[in-house]
Image: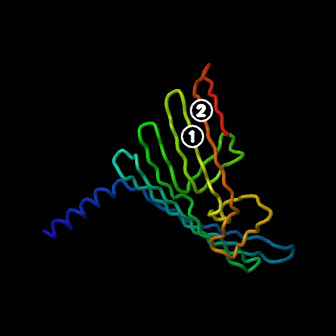
Amino acid sequence: MKKKIIAFVIAASAFSLFAVDFGGVLTNNSTLKNAQEGSSLKLNQKNSLTLWLKLPFDQTNSKSLAVQGKYQFEGDFVQKQNYNALNLDIFKFTLKKQNCTLTAGRFFYADTSSLIYSQNGDGIKADYVSPNFELSAYAFYTGLLNSHFTTILDFQKEQNKSKLYDLCPDYFTAGVKAVFPYLFCEQTLSAEC
């Protein structure tokens, strides 16, 4: 009986693995540059490893978990310093029910203009989509992001490159967005506050 249960668990796990999307990218960037006039060439080295995983919890993909992280090494041989940085780009759980979608965790969001807010954040977003009307509400916090990978202009806080994970300045943003697609003459009206 015990062997049948173990065989069933292994078979069920093997079948569910076909739906998992995962992968990675390894990059290497080596440059030679002349730091000062008359000096010899100096080597600058940057390596990074990015890994991702998307795991659906059902066959309709109405519940899913997406994770993406990055490790980066930078060797500045001109200044004879090495930098290491670790980042969690995405960690989001998505739940879809008919016309509604709820997303929670760390993920990218851009407002209508992409000028006020256009970056990753830790938060929650709720969407309702119908053929004539779309409504979104969101709230994000930036204080847990890594400042090595996210630029937030705050002149009070300096970036510390010696830390593996240096926290960003903390800001909270929230908003509501309404979209009326093809309202008149195939024009879309959007409003966000």
Quadrant into which the C terminus falls: top right
Say few, some or many: other residues with alpha carbon within 10 Å of mark 1 (under 14 / 14 to 19 / 20 or more): some
Residue at 68% in and 61% down? 170
Q: Residue furthest top?
A: 185
Is disc 1 placed on a helix, strand or loop? strand
Tell me where residue 186 appears, x and y as whole percent: 60, 22
Residue at the image point whose x is 44% and y is 55% from the top: 65
Give the image location of residue 147, x and y in percent: 68, 64
Q: Which mark is residue 136?
A: 1
Furthest residue in direction bottom, as rendered: 80
Pointer 2 residue: 179
Q: Residues within 10 Å of mark 2 (few under 14, many from 20)?
A: some
Tag 2 secondary structure: strand
Q: Amino acid at mark 1?
A: Ser
Front residue (pair 55, 92): 92
Mark 1 and mark 2 in contact? Answer it, CB < 8 Å. Answer: yes
Image quadrant in which you'd find residue 45: bottom right
Q: Residue 168 appears at what percent x and percent y?
A: 68, 64
Query: Could you tell whether 91 is left or right of 21 in the image?
Result: right
Q: Is residue 157 above or below residue 136?
A: below
Q: Is residue 68 above or below residue 125?
A: below
Q: Quadrant of the N terminus?
A: bottom left
Alpha carbon of mark 1 to alpha carbon of mark 2: how far? 9 Å
Tell me the amino acid under the disc marked 2: Val
Disc with the residue nearer the chain's start (1 vs 2):
1
Q: Nearer the viewer, residue 70 or 1?
A: 1
The residue positioned 71% from the left and 59% from the top of the image is: 151
